[in-house]
Amino acid sequence: MNIVIKCDCGNKIEMDVCPKKYLQLRDNLERGNFCFDGAEIKDNKLKEFRIRCCKCNNWITLGVG
């Protein structure tokens, strides 16, 4: 599998993940000049998290539940 995150400013990271394997998202984001920028947890479940571009400070929030 391949995960691609690309910001409007041109910053981009591609993460190749072997099938049925674990990817540490936070570490990979930091290598690509992105960062994990917080999360919302309700009832002990992750509801959403934010990814920020470290070059231009744009961000997105991803819902997971």
Image (cartoon, rainbow, N blue to C red):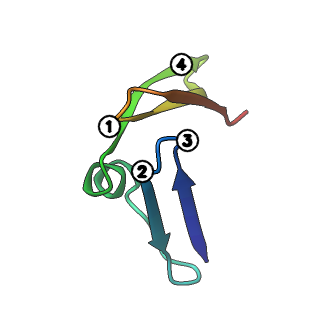
Q: What residue type is disc 3 on?
A: Asp
Q: Are marks 1 and 2 in contact (CB under 8 Å)?
A: yes
Which residue position is annotated with label 2? 11
Q: Position of residue 60 (x, y in %)?
A: 57, 30
Instruction: Tell me how far mark 2 sits from mark 3, CA to CA.
Output: 7 Å
Of labels 2 and 4, earlier in sequence is 2
Q: CA distance from mark 1 to mark 2?
A: 7 Å
Choose mark 2 or mark 4, whichever is in front: 2
Q: Position of residue 16 (x, y in %)?
A: 48, 77
Q: Quadrant of the N terminus?
A: bottom right
Where is mark 3, residue-wise? Answer: 8
Q: Nearer the viewer, residue 16 or 14?
A: 14
Residue tagged by mark 1? Answer: 55
Which SS class for mark 4?
strand
Q: Residue at x 73, y 33 (%)?
A: 65
Q: Is residue 10 above or below residue 39?
A: below
The three-letter amino acid code for the residue at tag 1 is Lys
Q: Is residue 8 above or below residue 50?
A: below
Alpha carbon of mark 1 to alpha carbon of mark 3: how far? 11 Å
Residue type at mark 2? Asn
Q: Secondary structure at mark 3?
A: loop
The residue under label 4 is 40
Q: Mark 4–mark 3 contact, CB under 8 Å?
A: no
> Are the residues at dot 1 and dot 3 in contact (C-beta closer than 8 Å)?
no
Q: Amino acid at mark 4?
A: Glu
Q: CA distance from mark 2 to mark 4?
A: 25 Å
Asked if residue 42 lies left or right of residue 28, the reply is right
Looking at the image, is mark 1 or mark 4 nearer the viewer? 1
Q: Is residue 7 left or right of residue 55?
A: right
Residue beneath the point at 35% across and 48% down: 26
